[in-house]
Image (tube, rainbow, N blue to C red):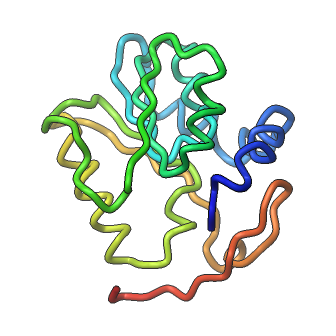
Amino acid sequence: MDYNKIAEKYDLYGKEAITDWLLGYDNVAKNLMPLKNKIILDFGCGTGKFSRFLRDKGARIVSLDISKEMLQIAKQYDCKNIKYYQINPYDKLNFDKDFFDAAVANFVFSTISSKIKIVSILKEINRILKKNGLIVILNSNWDKSNGREFIPFKLDYVKMTLWD
């Protein structure tokens, strides 16, 4: 899926959507408490809605996404205590080992068709987490969301593969 093409629509959806909160954003945040002065990685931040929420609770946020357009929209909002970076999620992340207190990945892994790639990303996130760091993953049900249409976009159907 080309997230650059849906960035504006995705951002508009994010302004009015309560579904994300009902599906678990609040629970993700609760698992990260206390947030004050923690350095948190938001992997797959989209237009930064959840990054801003965590920042407003006192955390310092590093937000990563593959979409240049999503990040451009995110940067139009208040960026205090948030750093945005475009990445290739399958490359090594350019952060030192033991840098982050915690990491979140909301609705990211349901868009990746390869178990090998998912494991690779998780290993890399684990590398940059502090020893007792926490990763909180919020994901939709693969079987029920694969190939489905959502308000701002339609997920392409992907066949899960073990090998790339």
In the rendered structure, the answer to whether residue 70 lies left or right of residue 36 reads: right
In the image, 140 versus 160, the foreground residue is 160
In the rendered structure, the answer to whether residue 149 lies left or right of residue 138 reads: right
Query: How many numbered marks, from 0 up?
Result: 0
What is the quadrant of residue 149 in the picture?
bottom right
User: Percent from the top left, x then y, of residue 115?
Assistant: 38, 77
In the image, 94 versus 38, the foreground residue is 94
Q: Residue at x 77, y 42 (%)?
A: 8
Q: Is residue 28 above or below residue 75?
A: below
User: Percent from the top left, x then y, of residue 30?
Assistant: 53, 30
In the rendered structure, the answer to whether residue 85 lies left or right of residue 134 reads: right
Q: Is residue 107 above or below residue 164?
A: above
Q: Quadrant of the N terminus?
A: bottom right
User: Percent from the top left, x then y, of residue 141?
Assistant: 63, 69
Q: Residue at x 32, y 40 (%)?
A: 134
User: Percent from the top left, x then y, of residue 153?
Assistant: 78, 61
Q: Is residue 140 above or below residue 18?
A: below
Q: Quadrant of the C terminus?
A: bottom left
Q: Residue at x 86, y 35 (%)?
A: 16
Q: Is residue 162 above or below residue 52?
A: below
Q: Residue at x 34, y 23 (%)?
A: 39
What is the quadrant of residue 146 in the picture?
bottom right
In the rendered structure, the answer to whether residue 100 lies left or right of residue 130 reads: right
In the image, 24 versus 54, the foreground residue is 54
In the image, 121 versus 130, the foreground residue is 121
What is the quadrant of residue 142 in the picture?
bottom right
